[in-house]
Image: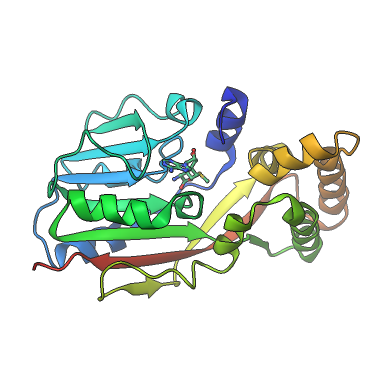
Amino acid sequence: MYVDINQSKAYADSRPSYTDELFKTIVDYCKKTNPNLNLAVDVGCGPGMSTIGFAKYFKKVIGVDVSETQIACAPEDIPNCEFKVGYSDKLPFIHPGSVDLFCCGEAFHWMPQEETFAEADRILRPGGTIAIFGYELPTSDIPEVQAIVHKFFMKLVPFNPKEAAQTSHGYKFLQMPYPDSIRNTKMQLLTKYTIQNYVDLIRSTWAARACREARPEQDILGDLAEELTEALEKFGSGKDFTLTWNLFLIMAHKPRN
Ligand SMILES: C[S@@+](CC[C@H](N)C(=O)[O-])C[C@H]1O[C@@H](n2cnc3c(N)ncnc32)[C@H](O)[C@@H]1O
């Protein structure tokens, strides 16, 4: 999916960063059934925003992504974080039963889910945790900006593969592989955007690329920038605006026997 370094750079610069509240919630859940925080594996890690927050809690964190350009944009200066190109369902470089946390942020809908869960089960230690998280469409306090965000989302919906719909439903239908699963929908991310930054975020999506390929005559990103500029001039309090993303997090422990 990500084969263009500029698309990966746009992704790294514009997607929301996760909060420590999210990482700590996951770590606290891990500790309920397993005192070890030796190794966390984050599949579909992208440029690492879902990976790096675990570095202060785990001895080692490995981020894995199928895209070389996404991995090329991951940070290189966190000593206990390693990033690798690879598939979520094929992790031969990880020993069976060696992982305390297997996680996936905003990526599980792109993966072969049954096979990825089987691989998680192979590498997780008994009592280890699976955590799957993501965010829904963002909202704005400025009604005009909200209307534009929604309008352009609806314009791009037809270009999304059907897998992407799962994020809009917060993975409501996801069956976790272990029985004690819990769902947390209480957390949010707040991200400040300039117009250019938000346009870059939309540029980094699958749907925007598919739309550009299918309708090269349309300038959806140009239209988005124009409408946002107009709305912020009329109704905003400056050139920046803040978006709120509702997070969803689903976790389960691998049984001890
Ligand atoms: C929307 S990004 C999420 C990145 C990051 N985890 C985050 O939370 O922002 C989805 C990532 O999943 C990766 N991906 C998709 N299918 C994959 C697979 N089967 N194995 C590993 N990575 C995969 C894509 O290359 C992409 O970087």
Left or right: 136 as drawn, with respect to 216: left
User: In the image shown, does 210 or 79 lie closer to the viewer?
Assistant: 210
Q: Is residue 21 visible?
A: no
Residue 82 point in image, percent of width and height: 28, 31
Which image quadrant: the C terminus?
Answer: bottom left
Q: How is the image coloured?
A: rainbow
User: Residue placed at 81% from the left, 51% from the top?
Assistant: 232
Q: Is residue 138 visible?
A: yes
Identify whether 204 is placed above or below 75. Answer: below
Residue 252 point in image, percent of width and height: 27, 67
User: Residue placed at 55% from the left, 63% from the top?
Assistant: 166
Left or right: 25 as drawn, with respect to 94: right
User: In the image shown, does 47 or 244 lie closer to the viewer?
Assistant: 47
Identify whether 155 is placed above or below 168. Answer: above
Left or right: 146 as drawn, with respect to 170: right
User: Residue placed at 56% from the left, 33% from the top?
Assistant: 2
Identify whether 109 is placed above or below 86. Answer: below
Residue 6 point in image, percent of width and height: 61, 25
Which image quadrant: the N terminus?
Answer: top right
Identify whether 129 is placed above or below 205. Answer: below
User: Count of labels shown?
Assistant: 0
User: Residue placed at 27% from the left, 37% from the top?
Assistant: 62
Left or right: 39 as drawn, with respect to 231: left
